[in-house]
Image (cartoon, rainbow, N blue to C red):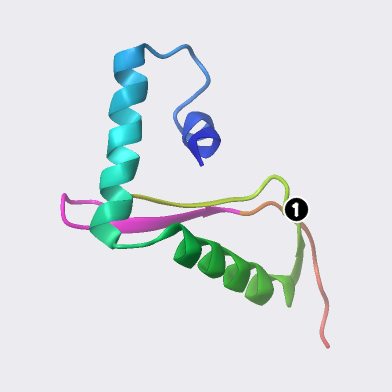
Amino acid sequence: MFDALRKLFGSEKESSKQIAARRLQLVLVHDRASVSPEIMDKLREEIIGVISKYMDINRENMDISLANGDNDNSVALVANIPVSRMKHGK
């Protein structure tokens, strides 16, 4: 998950202070949302299941995570799911 944050915020070198701040922010977001790693895994699998009905996706390069929302009291579900192709009618 930290790799996803690193991709999100760029790949330039970060200081130890910046890395620690990002890790703390991630912990706080997950804590605020009260989402356990098990629930995040289940959510990820269910999202994959639904999207896979309509599209072929690249699971290796996808990222689903929580981030701070627009204000201090909200959390956003952020999904970056590369789509290979659309599936046509069933």
Numbered disc total: 1
Quadrant in the picture for residue 73? bottom left
Give coordinates of residue 36: x percent, y percent: 40, 61
Crowdedness of circle 1 by 10 Å Cα count: few (<14), some, many (20+)? few
Residue type indicated by callout 1: Asn
Camera-nearest residue between 30 and 11: 30
Residue at 37% across / 22% down in the picture?
Answer: 19
As drawn, 5 above or below 16: below
Residue at 63% across / 54% down in the picture?
Answer: 81
Give coordinates of residue 17: x percent, y percent: 29, 16
Residue at 64% across / 50% down in the picture?
Answer: 62
From where the camera sits, is residue 20 visible?
A: yes
In the picture as drawn, the residue positioned furthest to the left comes out as 72
Locate residue 85 relative to residue 27 in the image: left or right. Answer: right
Residue at 29% across / 60% down in the picture?
Answer: 33
Camera-nearest residue between 40 and 7: 40
As drawn, 41 above or below 52: above
Q: Which residue is mark 1?
A: 58
Camera-nearest residue between 87 and 6: 6
Q: Is residue 33 magenta?
A: no
Q: Secondary structure at mark 1?
A: loop
Quadrant in the picture for residue 22? top left
Locate residue 41 relative to residue 37 in the image: left or right. Answer: right
Q: Quadrant of the C terminus?
A: bottom right
Give coordinates of residue 44: x percent, y percent: 57, 64
Locate residue 89 relative to residue 19 in the image: left or right. Answer: right
What span is in magenta?
Answer: 68-80
Give coordinates of residue 64: x percent, y percent: 53, 54
